[in-house]
Amino acid sequence: MNTVTNTETVRVEAYSDTVKKLGDWTDAHQFEVRGRNGYALLDLRSPRIAGDVEIRVHASRSTIKLLVPEDSVIDQWDLTFRGRGSVKDWEHTKATGTRRIRIVGEIENGEVRIVRGGIAILTAMFSREFVEDARRAHREGGRPTVHDPADTHA
């Protein structure tokens, strides 16, 4: 698992590709996601990410999926759509927390999907990265963390 630790902007590019950043992979607060005919999955549930998060998006015919804590508030006020596009957040009514995830930029014929709670855990578990993390945890005698980066059980 590649860990990014910095206070600068983390860049994720998905050009005709699938990019997944799962688990406890960063402590950054600013992200730039660019995509064209791509799919980007960002896990923002890590307890190391404290405070508000800003995601700058420039995407064309792409899907961006964000795994967020259950009580996070999504701010999409400065997000512009050209053509068809949307932000899908089925559980936005549960978002009563103080953590704000601000999505800004432009999307052309694409979408941003917000996933929380159990569905976020399942999304992470049904990935190749989870299988690799489970195998690593079995070899080393630890616990897998990709499914839930905030897992603090002993």
Image (tube, rainbow, N blue to C red):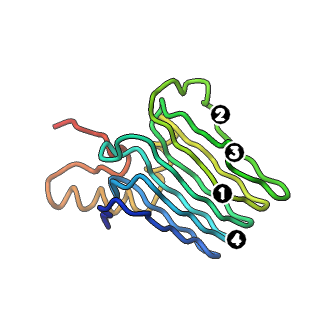
Crowding at dot 2, Cα within 10 Å, few <14 / some 14-19 / many 20+, comes out as: few
Crowding at dot 1, Cα within 10 Å, few <14 / some 14-19 / many 20+, comes out as: some
Mark in front: 1 vs 4: 1
- Residue sitting at 74 percent across and 47 percent down? 86
In the rendered structure, find residue 90 and report the number of the disc placed on it: 2
**Label 2, label 4: how far apart the Cα atoms are:** 24 Å
Q: Would residue 103 be found to the left or right of residue 97 on screen? A: right
For this rendering, which residue is in front, 11 or 142? 11
Question: Is residue 118 something one can see in this rendering?
Answer: no
Q: Are marks 1 and 3 in contact (CB under 8 Å)?
A: no
Q: Are marks 2 and 1 in contact (CB under 8 Å)?
A: no
Q: Earlier in the sequence, mark 1 or mark 3?
A: 3
Where does label 4 land, which residue? 37
In the rendered structure, find residue 105 and report the number of the disc placed on it: 1
Q: Is residue 142 above or below residue 14?
A: above
Q: Position of residue 87 (x, y in %)?
A: 69, 45
Q: Quadrant of residue 10?
A: bottom left
Q: Residue furthest right?
A: 83
In the rendered structure, find residue 87 and report the number of the disc placed on it: 3
Q: Are marks 2 and 3 in contact (CB under 8 Å)?
A: no
